[in-house]
Amino acid sequence: MEIFSAEDLARVITLKNTVEAVEAAFYDYNQGDIVLGGRLTAPCGQPGDSSLILPATHTGKQYYGFKQATTFAGNTQKGLPTVLSQYLLYSNVTGELLSIMDFLDMTNFKTGAAAAIATKYLALPHAHVVGVIGSGTLSRSVLAAICQVREIKEVKVFDLNEEQAKAFAAHARKSLNVRCEVAGSSRECVRNSHILCTCTTSPRPVLDGDDLLPGCHINAMGSYKIDMQELDEKTVKRAALIATDIPEDTAAEAGDLVCLADKSDIVPLDAIMGGQQKGRGSDSDITIYESIGFSVLDLALAVLAHEKCSSD
Amino acid sequence: MEIFSAEDLARVITLKNTVEAVEAAFYDYNQGDIVLGGRLTAPCGQPGDSSLILPATHTGKQYYGFKQATTFAGNTQKGLPTVLSQYLLYSNVTGELLSIMDFLDMTNFKTGAAAAIATKYLALPHAHVVGVIGSGTLSRSVLAAICQVREIKEVKVFDLNEEQAKAFAAHARKSLNVRCEVAGSSRECVRNSHILCTCTTSPRPVLDGDDLLPGCHINAMGSYKIDMQELDEKTVKRAALIATDIPEDTAAEAGDLVCLADKSDIVPLDAIMGGQQKGRGSDSDITIYESIGFSVLDLALAVLAHEKCSSD
């Protein structure tokens, strides 16, 4: 068994190979080569804290594995990350444990890549103005990954924490070579965006659907629980297409989609990529990719990291 | 994070401290200081293979953890154990991973200790003749642990594999200083036993309930799935008391108890130990402890091993 630290993983995992691995994982899942293994939430710590365990099996490449993520709200006061995470990767031939990886940074990396793949398949080809609501570490991963699939020229970022938004903008200008400004309001961030990314843990909508540009593609990356909400009802109603990873799970768990009367309108992204489902219909369609986390992508990234680290 | 191998654990874990830790765990669970975290079975390998994940939280000692056990039937042909297992132990204050342990041998150790505690509280005080059906590694752990709680003088062992039964008997005579003979039949093994232990993976009953001595206590350790069965219907009907770890889980999953009309007759062992439920009623009562595995005991043993190894 090998142990790979966050530093080991950072040496071999790049934005480029992550986006490629995530795209391949959606196709492998579509072909039935990656199989979901359920999910388990165990209580621990204080009320509200938890341990989430997400297994998946890559029957194509013969790996089995699961991500474990503890969420301890009180860690902030202790100077520790709220979420801590490991990936355990096993041989799918013998059940032997192959490696254990510190997966804390990988989750943001993977989520960013998922937004990029959704953008690649759903956003307008010429989309080049991005709005980002929320300016934490996830926002950085999401924007950087989107720059891999579209030629982004202009970015607006909005956050209630203006200092954090300024730091985000400075980082984006420097690392991604794009124009990036802090917006004074959610409306200013939303109204010219071809691609809009929400990356908050808000319990209430962070935008007004009336402000959306026709043709806008939205990556709603923050709301992963029923009591979280980033999109308002107008946004959901205006959308011509709502895509996600596992429609039944997203319908049950994403606060954004509570307002949706017919949950069967939610389409799996892999089926759009595989051609079994229709994607964007017209240039004026508003499209949404709603993400609550997808264990298939964690496994794909763990396999990539394991193979790269082992051959190092 | 620390890694403890099977050898590290073998240096600090003894039969005596395991039996003590398991007894304490039943009491801690009874007091609400250890909390169950559900269970997840994920598909992997070939059809029928699986990964089982069993979390539990020790709110008293502030540990969270889970056992992972892969079962790959094809491993026998590869010269590998069918079951491979790890324990991951976390701080229940911060969610940090404290240690990962090779838990393969610990599971048999723990199961043996559970049989010993059931025997301590349910068998007749003077019980000194033990019958063992099945002679694999689990049988060795079970017999050795029972010798910690009763003064055993005589053992009979029966197995369809006579060579393995002979090796078991020789090992018992040498390591436990008891008389131990191979029985020619299940009946010969059962009929004089004060304590009877079944440790097989049989799909059909391995004994005839008519052969049981009045007052006999049975540890049914093998059947942990609905399609496995060690006890016949007569045995279950003759029993005055059926104890287990989690009655609802055992009722749903143990093939031995499918015949039981009223599943509410199954009593939690911890409640008998804690005095909330009545134990054995008379010297002639037949009692059963039905075990399908109990994550509370895995956690207790992991905590013991972690604390002993860390302070080494």
Image (cartoon, coloured by chain):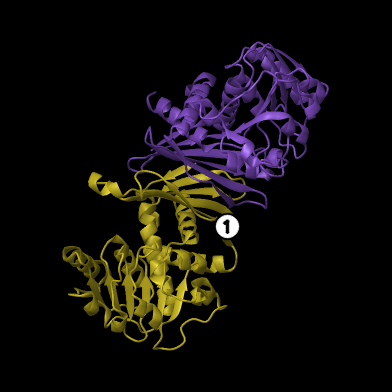
Chain colours: A purple, B yellow
- Taking the image as shown, residue B259 lies to the left or right of residue A284, namely left
- Taking the image as shown, residue A178 lies to the left or right of residue B190, namely right
Rendered residue at 54%/74% (across/down) = B271
Residue A184 placed where, x, y %?
Answer: 83, 21
Camera-nearest residue between B226 and B16: B226
- Taking the image as shown, residue A179 lies to the left or right of residue A42, namely right
Q: Is residue A9 above or below residue A203?
A: above
Camera-nearest residue between A172 and B257: B257
Camera-nearest residue between A142 and A73: A142
Rendered residue at 69%/23% (across/down) = A285
Rendered residue at 64%/17% (across/down) = A124
Q: Is residue B151 above or below residue A85?
A: below
Residue A94 placed where, x, y %?
Answer: 33, 42
Q: Is residue B199 visible?
A: yes
Residue A56 placed where, x, y %?
Answer: 46, 40
Residue B159 placed where, x, y %?
Answer: 22, 68
Q: Does dot 1 land on a helix, a strand or a loop?
A: loop
Q: Amino acid at mark 1?
A: Lys
Rendered residue at 48%/46% (across/down) = B99
Which quadrant holds residue A146? top right
Which quadrant holds residue A83? top right
Q: Is residue B246 above or below residue A65?
A: below
Chain containing the residue with disc 1: B
Q: Residues within 10 Å of mark 1 (few under 14, many from 20)?
A: some
Q: Is residue A160 visible?
A: no
Camera-nearest residue between A226 and A86: A226
Residue pointed to by mark 1: B61
